[in-house]
Image (spheres, rainbow, N blue to C red):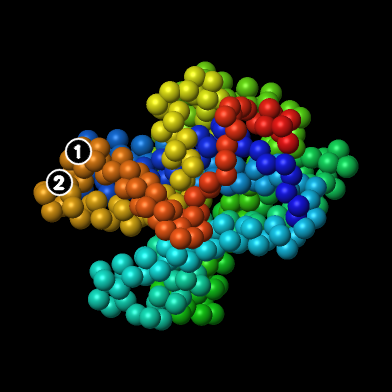
């Protein structure tokens, strides 16, 4: 696909920054599961981790929006796939090697067979399911664009979003668990094979990607953003997070994540636009996290393991608030430092996935960026 004139939407750097901060909060905060339930840290950490459940959906939304902005009418499939695979697959393989090496060091029974399967299944660390799904969506993107163009010609630009949402509900309500069991009944080369495969099928993330496509194409995007992104709805989002905390996981949790994430995307976009207009240290910090977001995603579980081991060595444990106050920002800082150093190496940016395109001096909202295109 031939790319449109390059654009850079500053708000989306901030959205990525908020998303990766949420993901690190989920994984760093999950250590509350290791402590006595009577500790006040447990409900607080549980709530904060579920308040962060929007993290991965935001990444899919931004990917759908940006790809549609750049490639909606393009036709060079070979160039599109080459660029997408280089951006995503090369860093994935590089960091898989790091995680596999760590597994060999820390897990005495870890085998070469497990290592090989972990690369095939995107399971060197559990968070790599996201990359498996993202690659599927990239492979499907030209077909999704044909569908979207056809729908718009028929005056049904919302069709893909509606169908993908319906498929999402059916998937989690009726299909994902039976499919995992069926796969396990056929073959189980590694423990939990069926669950691993089912978790990496794109249907469970398609609505967020489709939402990004719809948002980029819809003339009513700004009016929907103004309504759902009203700061008067912040209490609704906070209550919604409480519901997710109560549900914990499972089918009803997955169904509730969809409307919660839509609300959070609108709120965070409005917040990002507000921050962009004002600038300052907060804007710069969140934007930096957004710039390094994919690399942070790849590296953060390894950095969490390193920091947690150091904290345990000095008798700081998960039942202490200082544990989280050191772990969460420490993970972000160490990830950015690692990625910065790797970027200095020959072909370093290929290994980290850090986006280094030159930005315009002023960044504005999505509508202005589209006009620049």
Percent coordinates x, y for residue 265 in the rendering: 55, 34
Above-or-below relation of 271 to 210: above
Q: Which mark is residue 49?
A: none
How busy is the neighbourhood of tag 2: few (under 14 within 10 Å), some, or many (20 plus)? some
At 73% across and 36% down in the image, what residue appears? 373
Residue ID for mark 2: 316
Horizontal arrangement in the rendering, residue 175 relative to residue 372 (left or right) = left
Counting the numbered discs, the total is 2
Q: Quadrant of the N terminus?
A: bottom right
Percent coordinates x, y for residue 174 in the rendering: 59, 57
At 68% across and 41% down in the image, what residue appears? 6
Above-or-below relation of 58 to 134: above
Q: Is residue 241 visible?
A: no
In space, the residues marked 1 and 2 are separated at their CA atoms by 8 Å
**Image marks 1 and 2: residues in contact by CB distance under 8 Å:** yes
Circle 2 — which element?
A: loop
Percent coordinates x, y for residue 314 in the rendering: 11, 49
Q: Which mark is residue 322?
A: 1
Percent coordinates x, y for residue 26 in the rendering: 38, 45
Above-or-below relation of 175 to 365: below
């Amino acid at each position: 696909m031939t790319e449109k004139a390059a654009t850079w939407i500053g708000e989306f750097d901030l959205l990525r920054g908020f998303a990766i901060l949420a993901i690190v909060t989920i994984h760093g905060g999950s250590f509350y599961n290791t402590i006595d339930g009577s500790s006040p840290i447990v409900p607080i950490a549980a709530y904060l981790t579920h308040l962060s459940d929007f993290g991965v959906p935001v990444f899919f939304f931004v990917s759908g929006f940006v790809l549609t902005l750049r490639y909606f009418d393009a036709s060079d499939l070979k160039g599109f796939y080459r660029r997408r695979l280089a951006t995503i697959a090369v860093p994935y393989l590089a960091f898989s090697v790091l995680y596999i090496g760590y597994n060999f060091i820390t897990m005495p029974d870890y085998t070469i067979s497990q290592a090989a399967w972990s690369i095939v299944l995107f399971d060197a660390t559990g968070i790599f399911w996201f990359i498996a799904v993202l690659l599927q969506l990239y492979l499907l993107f030209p077909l999704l664009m044909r569908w979207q163009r056809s729908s718009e010609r028929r005056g049904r630009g919302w069709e893909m979003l509606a169908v993908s949402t319906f498929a999402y509900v059916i998937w989690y309500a009726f299909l994902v668990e039976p499919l995992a069991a069926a796969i396990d009944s056929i073959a189980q080369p590694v423990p939990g094979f069926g669950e691993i495969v089912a978790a990496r099928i794109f249907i469970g993330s398609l609505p967020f990607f489709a939402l990004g496509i719809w948002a980029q194409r819809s003339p009513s995007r700004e009016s929907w953003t103004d309504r759902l992104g009203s700061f008067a709805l912040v209490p609704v989002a906070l209550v919604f997070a409480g519901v997710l905390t109560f549900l914990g996981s499972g089918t009803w949790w997955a169904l509730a994540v969809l409307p919660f994430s839509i609300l959070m995307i609108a709120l965070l976009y409005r917040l990002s636009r507000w921050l962009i207009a004002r600038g300052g240290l907060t804007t710069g910090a969140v934007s930096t996290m957004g710039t390094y977001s994919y690399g942070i995603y790849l590296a953060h579980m390894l950095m969490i393991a390193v920091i947690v081991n150091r904290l345990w060595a000095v008798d700081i444990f998960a039942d202490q608030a200082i544990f989280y106050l050191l772990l969460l920002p420490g993970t972000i800082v160490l990830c950015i430092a690692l990625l910065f150093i790797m970027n200095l190496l020959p072909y370093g940016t290929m290994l980290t996935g850090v986006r280094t395109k030159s930005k315009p001096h002023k960044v504005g909202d999505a509508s202005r960026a589209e006009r620049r295109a």
